[in-house]
Image (cartoon, rainbow, N blue to C red):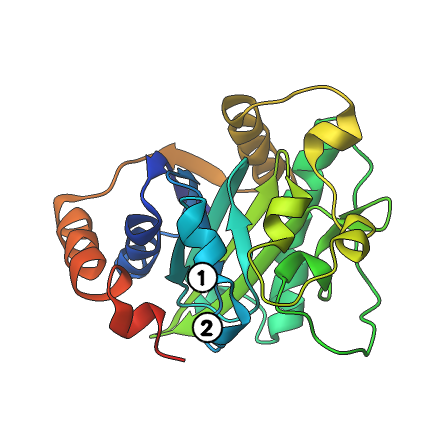
């Protein structure tokens, strides 16, 4: 299967979410890789803003943006974020089964790095946390029983969008402080990062190459390197201005 590979590098949080939505118009499937500047707390579409410590985020120059997808909040800082966009009819109908399929590419990539990842096959029934990395979902990626990738999915207009944060490193105390109620010690037991598991530093460039290799190997994808078209860029700029950078969108709940 042919995919566009778009390595869009660093963008503002609002533009990152705008680009993901704009790429829903792509005729070919897309794997997009990117980073965030400044750091940002992305919150799920249905998430209540009163769960977030907005004062801490403002004081520490952490932007807040609401995603098109559901799920809970993620602190985007030292990471690689991926977006996987494809016609819905080319994926399993079940959300869980489509997570499993996409996770095979991520699992393969982390294995190529020398890690020993596994898919989560147990979801505990307990009070839901507002913190994405506190609650591993079905077939999300764990290492040593700790979550290392947090993903969310949306199906809209015949397309499937799944995007997620692959943690290169993490400041757990900083992450926890972004919330009104949090338990840093509990979070430490549930979250990890590539640098921590490898016990050496990796970087965005090397990880991007490995993610590409993982999806090629596991899902038999053929990539053609691509950039946003003029139409996609224009749409993303409009969505950035009129939607994702507005309080009306970000503070709606």
Q: Can you tell which quarter of the image residue 249 is in? A: bottom left
Q: In this image, 52 relative to 97: left or right?
A: left
Give the foreground label among 1 and 2: 1
CA gap, disc 1 and disc 2: 8 Å
> Image height check: is 101 above or below 181?
above
Where residue 72 sits: x, y (%)? 57, 66
* Residue designated by label 1: 54
Q: Can you tell which quarter of the image residue 3 is in? A: top left
> Image height check: is 237 above or below 136?
above
The answer to whether residue 133 is seen in the rendering is: yes
Where residue 100 sits: x, y (%)? 68, 60
Q: In this image, 2 relative to 211: left or right?
A: left
Where residue 69 sits: x, y (%)? 46, 68
Q: Residues within 10 Å of mark 2 (few under 14, many from 20)?
A: some
Q: Residue 199 shows which numbered tag?
A: none
Where residue 150 sits: x, y (%)? 62, 54
* Residue designated by label 2: 49
> Image height check: is 8 above or below 230?
above
Q: In this image, 126 relative to 202: left or right?
A: right
Residue positioned most to the top? 200
Question: Label 2's element?
Answer: helix
The answer to whether residue 219 is seen in the rendering is: no
For the C terminus, the image quarter is bottom left
Question: Label 1's element?
Answer: helix
Q: Are marks 1 and 2 in contact (CB under 8 Å)?
A: yes
């Amino acid at each position: 299967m042919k995919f566009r590979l778009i390595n869009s590098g660093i963008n503002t949080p609002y533009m990152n979410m705008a680009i993901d939505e704009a790429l829903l118009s792509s005729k070919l499937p897309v794997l997009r890789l990117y980073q965030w500047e400044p750091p940002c707390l992305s919150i799920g579409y249905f998430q209540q803003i009163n769960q977030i410590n907005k004062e801490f985020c403002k004081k520490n120059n952490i932007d807040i943006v609401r995603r098109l997808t559901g799920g809970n909040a993620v602190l985007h800082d030292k990471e690689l974020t991926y977006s996987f966009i494809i016609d819905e009819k080319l994926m399993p109908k079940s959300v869980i089964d489509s997570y499993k399929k996409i996770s095979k590419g991520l699992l393969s990539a982390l294995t190529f790095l020398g890690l020993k990842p596994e898919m989560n096959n147990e979801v505990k029934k307990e009070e839901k946390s507002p913190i994405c990395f506190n609650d591993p979902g079905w077939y999300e990626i764990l290492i040593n029983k700790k979550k290392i990738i947090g993903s969310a999915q949306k199906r809209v207009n015949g397309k499937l969008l799944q995007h997620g944060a692959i943690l290169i490193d993490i400041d757990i105390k900083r992450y926890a402080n972004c919330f009104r109620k949090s338990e840093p010690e509990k979070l430490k037991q549930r979250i990890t990062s590539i640098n921590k598991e490898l016990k050496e530093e990796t970087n965005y460039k090397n990880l991007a190459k490995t993610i590409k290799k993982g999806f090629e190997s596991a899902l038999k994808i053929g990539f053609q390197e691509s950039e946003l078209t003029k139409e996609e860029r224009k749409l993303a700029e409009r969505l950035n201005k009129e939607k994702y950078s507005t309080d009306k969108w970000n503070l709606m709940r």
